[in-house]
Amino acid sequence: MGRKWNNIKEKKASKDKNTSRVYAKFGREIYVAAKQGEPDPESNQALKVVLERAKTYSVPRAIVDRAIEKAKGGAEENFDVLRYEGFGPSGSMVIVETLTNNVNRTASDVRAAFGKNGGNMGVSGSVAYMFDATAIFAFEGKTADDILELMMEADLDVRDILEEEESVIIYAEPEQFHAVQETLKEAGITDFSVAELVMLAQNEVTLSEEDVQQFEKMIDALEDLEDVQQVYHNVEL
């Protein structure tokens, strides 16, 4: 799974360079999670997960508080959670997750981002079956053997634990996100470079240099869309 970790790392590095856009997306996601349950992370698991993810991107507390206060204030801005699937150059596969208050606008924008950059939008289910929903954590200061022992003591059977570039990476089932993180925190591990719920491709493909350029242009166009929260793909970059 090392190459998959590299893709996650590169994606995060790219996002770190676009902080205002990332903060806006997190603000929306925090608001939606807070509206769907109690605006308290201790009683709202979805909100707690979003807030933990936001920490790894250094989202300012003011943005977090503003989104939660907006939800507490009874704002009636409604968002739909939608997933689009499509194909890029040479049959590459892409999943686009969105939060939108205008479904027609979002569908049109996503379709255009695919179509104008060498791709095309597929039907629901045309791509998702080739990806696995996954909880992923990355941190430093421990060995894979240390973490394996820790997970075993907590009776957590995660998918994989490996070491790469001084980091330990854990791949787990999505429903294990909270349990894994709490186990790590109890062991004194609180600084995560990645703590995410992602869609990981089961198999990655390698594109030609020309196709990679076209593909990256398409991904940039999708990620630039206001309603897009996450973009996942199966290309090794």
Image (cartoon, grey):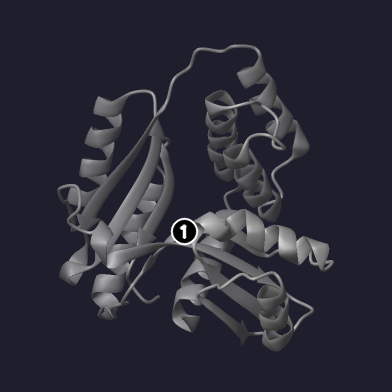
Q: Nearer the viewer, residue 104 or 76?
A: 76
Does residue 89 lie above or below 102 as drawn? below
Residue 159 is situated, as x and y percent measured from the top left of the image, at 50, 75
Q: Is residue 95 left or right of residue 11?
A: left
Q: Residue at x 40, y 75 (%)?
A: 237
**Label 1 amino acid?**
Val
Does residue 201 lie above or below 196 as drawn? below
Residue 111 falls in image quadrant: top left
Q: Residue at x 60, y 44 (%)?
A: 50
Q: Is residue 117 visible?
A: no
Residue 89 falls in image quadrant: bottom left
Does residue 165 lie above or below 180 as drawn? below
Q: Nearer the viewer, residue 174 or 57?
A: 174
Residue 76 is situated, as x and y percent measured from the top left of the image, at 50, 12
Q: Is residue 130 left or right of residue 41?
A: left
- What residue does disc 1 label? 198
Give neighbour class at mark 1: few <14, some 14-19, many 20+ (Cα, 10 Å): some
Q: Residue at x 66, y 81 (%)?
A: 148
Residue 29 is situated, as x and y percent measured from the top left of the image, at 54, 36
Residue 155 falls in image quadrant: bottom right
